[in-house]
Image: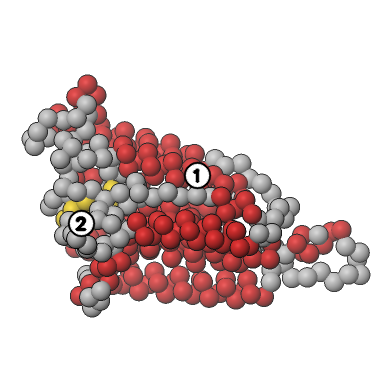
Amino acid sequence: MAGVDVENRGGGPVKNGSRGGGGGGNYYSSSSTSFVVDDGETQWTSWLVPMVVVANIALFVVMMYVNDCPKHNRAGPCVAKFLGRFSFEPLRLNPLFGPSNSTLIKLGALDWHRVVHRHQGWRLVTCIWLHAGVIHLAVNMLCLILIGVRLEQQFGFVRIGIVFLLSGFGGSVLSAVFNPNYITVGASGALFGLLGAMLSELFTNWTLYTNKAAALVTLAFVIAVNIALGILPHVNNLANIGGFLTGFLLGFILLPRPQLAWLDRRNLPADVPVKSKYRAYQYVLWVASLLLLLAGFTVGLVMLFRGKNVNDHCHWCHYLSCVPTDSWTCNGK
């Protein structure tokens, strides 16, 4: 694995390496959600996020069992041989302490050629659940716990589960359209989708926040830092951006909160008119976001399955994923 991404995609071209999804280099924070006013809505018990973490760990163990480095590796000594068939590939192939590229592809990594030419569209979803190594897995799951548990407690498992899955899917689509020569694994797009949903939730529930400036500045800073890290080599920023945009739109659709006056309707006299559950601007944002989301998925999937490479028509778009400097090049991305 020659060069491994710490964001949703493995390090090099398919023939050389894979990029780890959603991993190191991202430092998420859910602190901004603490600024929201308690509006009396149900506080949920978080169980989906812990289950997703357990599922990812279990899948990684299965992946390492299938990989069986001592049996299949011919490129050098395996790492941590005492683990037997669970030992890791040589660090020069996978510095994240994980399996080989062939194992990742076998178990569902996103590979543009297999999606387009072999009609394996299911890889757009399965790649979200795979990780390139122990480091990659640990960082992703820690970030998921920090962000996801709080969101699930506030909005429930259904809405947060939808945001997580569709954001991961959106990140996979954008990554495949812009980077057809790489394989992709990891939950980076899904994690960035949760960040995007946090931002749109702040906007759509703006009147319910007591400290709007602090909430906005804190969340904007966290997002900006993570997006900026995406221009470094070995980081799949396009999967991050795709997941973020998907989650941002989904936040307007799934996370609006009712007006306080509507929540207090039962305490009002019978002759007092009850206000609408949501404000007018929330309805407008809901419709606009739904239309944009449907349009984005439609255009992205059509371009993907027609085998279009966006970089052929956009000569600057590759800078969204990596900006070359005197200290590094982007040839390995």
Say which amino acid is labelled 2.
Answer: Ser
The residue beneath circle 2 is 327
Q: Position of residue 122 (x, y in %)?
A: 31, 55
Q: Quadrant of residue 303?
A: bottom left
Label 2 environment density (alpha carbons within 10 Å; few <14, some 14–19, many ≥20): few
Tally of numbered tags: 2
The residue at 62%/51% (across/down) is 34
Say which amino acid is labelled 1.
Answer: Leu
Whether residue 110 appears in this view of the structure is no
* Mark 2 vs 1, N-terminal side: 1
**Which sits in the foreground, 190 or 3?**
3
The residue at 26%/62% (across/down) is 322
Q: How is the image coloured?
A: secondary structure
Q: Position of residue 199 (x, y in %)?
A: 53, 61
The residue beneath circle 1 is 146
The residue at 57%/71% (across/down) is 286
Q: Position of residue 205 (x, y in %)?
A: 64, 64
On screen, residue 17 versus residue 248, left or right, reads: left
Label 1 environment density (alpha carbons within 10 Å; few <14, some 14–19, many ≥20): some
What SS does tag 2 mark? loop
